[in-house]
Image (cartoon, grey):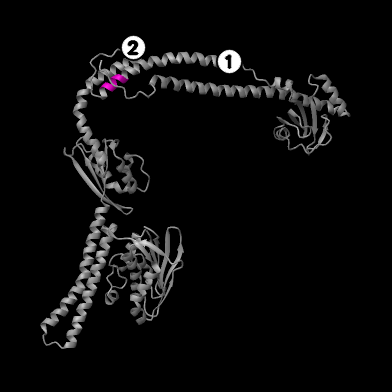
């Protein structure tokens, strides 16, 4: 026999786990039964004593109805019964004690006593508690007869405790049955354990590719027959297993690393295999939750695939070749390419590939290329036109010559700004980790910007107000923070109009963020443009924007700068209502 080194020394054998599992369940059942039976016996004893006292209550009711002196009747009744220390109480419907033989002189309202409350609700009630009147512990039984409560009580003495004592014979019986079950189960499970141990040795040999050289001997029972068949089937399937193992490994690896959702189905639509991505993508496409791969074919967006399968699967006359169908779905902001391949045996596979990123990148590249080309074309054409005029007219007057050169310089400055802004955005998109970080004082930074823009501010008669309580400072990139506030100032100066008022306000601070607002009371923009003003090259008034020399990238740089500092930005405006930007900046990134 091949010797196998043990790697599971600390593991409890199956036979022991089986034994202790079954025995624990039996023991749990036994404990539950004992608790149940104990409770039943306890309730039975209480009910027995309750019936006795309840019978006393009815007898007292009948006797007191025929006599005028209740005290004599009660004492005569007690003399006739074995319980000489019986306490009798009669309570009227209002809870007042009409009679009590306990000797207590004062009684409060008894309708709040637990046994009395039960009797009011169910005509009978009992309780074990201490008396508020005498301080002694009693077993009470109360009976509601015509609204009056007749209550009998026995003191909690040895006699009462003996009456309520539970017969424990059932406990001894269950203990004996548990012991017998223990020995029978141990013999049965350990016999199973020996057979399973042999099967385990066989399985370990198979796992390590050590084919057993000996014949395993199993017991002559049903489990032994199953074990023999397992060994026989192993030898039969070993060859087929070796041939298929490589193809199986390829298929598993394909599923593990595939980025697309994939599922294969029988001709009846039953799932053969699928990966996690398939159901996830199907749920992104569907408006209803998809739990199983089979449900994906019923998604309305996959109706072309469904029609393709319905047309070709029942068609016995179709050409014997593999058919393919594909459909593109644009749903919930994502674009999916869905392909279906129908095989010769009418089984089919469906793949779902998320091509949103490729489509979006392609669209953005096309748009960016068009916008950049368009923006570069204007200043380059202007410079070229002015230079051609100068070259073509050597005798051009000095004032005209200077004018054209100044225009060339102006357009080249605009071109430089455009290239600079594009460079900043590219760095933010592709190399944001290269920006250096330092402590930046926002009050000082805003002051520097206002000095640089003072000429334009004075020319347009603009007033400014800076409200920065607490002297906010941010550990971030100086050039990006400068670009945020400078572009907001430039935007307001260029487009808000003359005689406006600009306000920079740090209106809130929490442990992590500063909350800023930048507002003006200028002309504003219509609401339809507000959500798009942060897009690259987007212009509200293209003609006026080009006239004042904007690149169309300023607010896009602002948004990306805010995002770099882990914040968010939004805008609010309306025609004639001015423009307000709300944004947050993290204190330390």
Q: Compared with residue 86, is residue 457 higher up or lower down, i.e. above or below?
A: below
Residue 530 in sight here: yes
The percent coordinates of residue 506 (x first, y second) are 44, 67
What secondary structure is the magenta-colored segment mainly? Answer: helix
Q: Quarter of the image holding residue 397?
A: bottom left
Q: Which mark is residue 219?
A: 2
Label 1 packing within 10 angstroms: few (<14), some (14-19), many (20+): few
Q: Is residue 228 magenta?
A: no
Q: Quadrant of residue 141?
A: top right
**Quick one: label 2 or label 1, which is nearer the N terminus?**
1
Circle 1 sits on which residue?
172
Tell me where residue 55 sits by quadrant.
top right
Is residue 200 shown left or right of residue 369?
Answer: right
Would residue 534 be seen by someone viewing this image from the given angle?
A: no
Within the magenta stretch, is there residue 203? yes
- What residue appears at the point 52 percent right and 16 percent down from the top-left corner? 178
């Amino acid at each position: 026999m091949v010797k196998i080194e043990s790697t599971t020394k600390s593991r409890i054998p199956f036979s022991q786990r089986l034994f202790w599992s079954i025995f624990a369940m039996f023991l749990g059942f036994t404990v539950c039964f004992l608790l149940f039976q104990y409770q039943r016996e306890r309730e039975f004893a209480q009910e027995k004593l309750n019936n006795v006292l309840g019978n006393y209550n009815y007898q007292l009711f009948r006797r007191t109805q025929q006599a005028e002196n209740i005290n004599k009747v009660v004492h005569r009744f007690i003399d006739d019964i074995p319980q000489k220390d019986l306490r009798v109480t009669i309570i009227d419907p209002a809870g007042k004690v009409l009679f009590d033989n306990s000797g207590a002189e004062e009684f409060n309202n008894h309708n709040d006593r637990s046994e009395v409350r039960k009797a009011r609700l169910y005509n009978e009630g009992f309780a074990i508690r201490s008396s508020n009147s005498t301080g002694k512990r009693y077993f009470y039984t109360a009976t509601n007869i015509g609204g009056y409560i007749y209550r009998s009580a026995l003191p909690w003495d040895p006699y009462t405790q003996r009456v309520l004592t539970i017969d424990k014979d059932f406990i001894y019986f269950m203990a004996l049955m548990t012991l017998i079950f223990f020995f029978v189960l141990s013999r049965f499970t350990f016999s199973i354990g020996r057979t399973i141990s042999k099967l385990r040795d066989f399985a370990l040999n198979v796992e390590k590719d050590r084919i057993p050289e000996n014949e395993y001997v199993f017991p002559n029972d049903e489990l032994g027959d199953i074990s023999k068949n397992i060994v026989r089937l192993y030898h039969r399937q070993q060859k087929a297993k070796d041939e298929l193992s490589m193809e199986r490994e390829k298929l598993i690896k394909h599923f593990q690393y595939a980025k697309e959702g994939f599922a294969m189905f029988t001709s009846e639509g039953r799932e053969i295999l699928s990966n996690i991505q398939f159901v996830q993508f199907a749920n992104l496409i569907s408006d209803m939750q998809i739990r199983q791969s089979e449900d994906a074919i019923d998604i309305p967006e996959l109706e072309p695939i469904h029609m393709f399968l319905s047309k070709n699967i029942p068609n016995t006359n179709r050409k014997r070749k593999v058919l393919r169908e594909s459909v593109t779905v644009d749903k919930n902001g994502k674009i999916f390419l869905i392909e279906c391949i129908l095989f010769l045996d009418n089984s089919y596979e469906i793949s779902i590939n998320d091509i949103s990123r490729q489509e979006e990148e392609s669209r953005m590249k096309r748009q960016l290329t068009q916008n950049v080309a368009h923006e570069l074309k204007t200043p380059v054409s202007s410079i070229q036109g002015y230079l051609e005029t100068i070259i073509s007219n050597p005798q051009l007057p000095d004032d005209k010559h200077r004018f054209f050169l100044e225009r060339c310089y102006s357009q080249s400055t605009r071109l430089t700004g455009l290239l600079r802004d594009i460079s900043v955005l590219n760095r933010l998109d592709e190399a944001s980790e290269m920006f250096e970080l330092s402590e930046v004082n926002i009050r000082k930074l805003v002051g520097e910007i206002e000095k640089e823009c003072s000429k334009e501010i004075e020319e347009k008669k603009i007033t400014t107000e800076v409200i920065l309580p607490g002297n906010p400072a941010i550990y971030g990139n100086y050039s990006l923070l400068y670009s945020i506030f400078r572009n907001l100032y430039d935007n307001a100066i260029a487009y808000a109009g003359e005689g406006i008022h600009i306000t920079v306000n740090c209106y809130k601070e929490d442990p992590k963020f500063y909350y800023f607002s930048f507002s003006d009371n200028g002309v504003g923009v219509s609401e339809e443009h507000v959500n798009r003003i942060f897009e690259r090259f987007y212009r509200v008034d293209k003609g006026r924007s080009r006239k004042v020399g904007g690149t169309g990238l300023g607010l896009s740089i602002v948004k990306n700068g805010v995002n770099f500092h882990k914040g968010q930005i939004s805008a609010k405006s309306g025609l004639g209502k001015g423009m307000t930007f709300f944004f947050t900046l993290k204190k330390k990134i």
